[in-house]
Image (cartoon, rainbow, N blue to C red):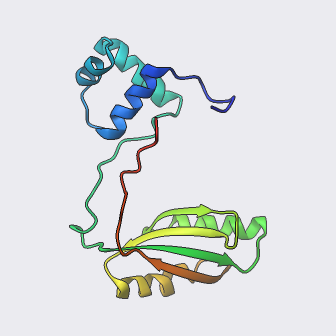
């Protein structure tokens, strides 16, 4: 762990793992599973949230049932790699609701964007109307996902 991060013990890690699996787990249930009182468990959870280990709670939705059938990853190449270009691109991409994730990467391109849309026609509209209109975008490469193999996203605790 980085020096700036507070230290957490095995019980904290167990609580975090349980919450990753079920964010709606009741405090009493968590307490039983880690062998602490509900009060002690509640205090640990408050501390873990205060120290930034827990960053929020949300429901995991089924994208297909919501009509968002196509998952796409896009390599984004900027026309220049200056701090100003990076800042302008990052600020603009944060305002695009279709963008699920965006990561600046080291390697042959500048950003990796993850988006989910209804179908290829919707992606084409997103590409032309949103992604290519972002500041400093020079080029993109698209990778449509054929099969989602692992999507649980849980951190290895």
Q: Which one is nearer the viewer's eye here, 25 or 51?
A: 25
The residue sitting at 45% across, 81% down in the picture is 126
Can you say whether 39 is above or below 144 in the image?
above
The residue sitting at 24% across, 28% down in the picture is 26
- Determine whether, in the image, residue 23 is placed left or right of residue 102: left
- Determine whether, in the image, residue 26 is placed left or right of residue 110: left
The residue sitting at 54% across, 63% down in the picture is 102
Q: Quadrant of residue 62?
A: bottom left
Give the image location of residue 46, x and y in percent.
Answer: 42, 24
- Determine whether, in the image, residue 112 is placed left or right of residue 87: left
Give the image location of residue 147, x and y in percent.
Answer: 34, 70
The residue sitting at 28% across, 38% down in the picture is 22
- Determine whether, in the image, residue 112 is placed left or right of residue 146: right
In which quadrant is the N terminus drawn? top right
Q: List the single residue furthest toward the right.
A: 82
Q: Which one is nearer the viewer's eye here, 92 or 108?
A: 108
Can you say whether 127 is above or below 84 in the image?
below
Would you say residue 155 is visible in this rendering?
yes
Would you say residue 135 is visible in this rendering?
no
Can you say whether 59 is above or below 126 in the image?
above
Q: List the single residue furthest toward the left.
A: 65
Give the image location of residue 31, x and y in percent.
Answer: 29, 18
Can you say whether 7 is above or below 134 in the image?
above
Q: Which one is nearer the viewer's eye here, 99 or 21?
A: 21
Q: Quadrant of residue 150?
A: bottom left
Query: Exactly how many numbered labels are in the figure?
Result: 0
Give the image location of residue 69, x and y in percent.
Answer: 29, 74
């Amino acid at each position: 762990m980085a020096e700036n991060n507070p230290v957490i013990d095995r019980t904290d890690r167990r609580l975090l793992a349980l919450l990753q699996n079920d964010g709606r787990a009741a405090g009493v249930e968590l307490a039983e599973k880690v062998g602490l009182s509900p009060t002690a468990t509640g205090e640990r959870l408050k501390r873990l949230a205060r120290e930034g280990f827990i960053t929020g709670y949300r429901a995991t939705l089924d994208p297909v049932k919501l009509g968002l059938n196509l998952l796409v990853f896009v390599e984004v190449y900027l026309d220049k790699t200056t701090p100003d270009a990076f800042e302008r691109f990052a600020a603009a991409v944060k305002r695009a609701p279709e963008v699920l994730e965006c990561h600046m990467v080291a390697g042959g391109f500048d950003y990796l964007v993850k988006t989910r849309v209804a179908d290829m026609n919707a992606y084409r509209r997103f590409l032309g109307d949103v992604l290519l209109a972002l500041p400093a975008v020079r080029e993109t490469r698209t990778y449509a996902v054929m099969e989602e193999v692992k999507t649980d996203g849980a951190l290895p605790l």
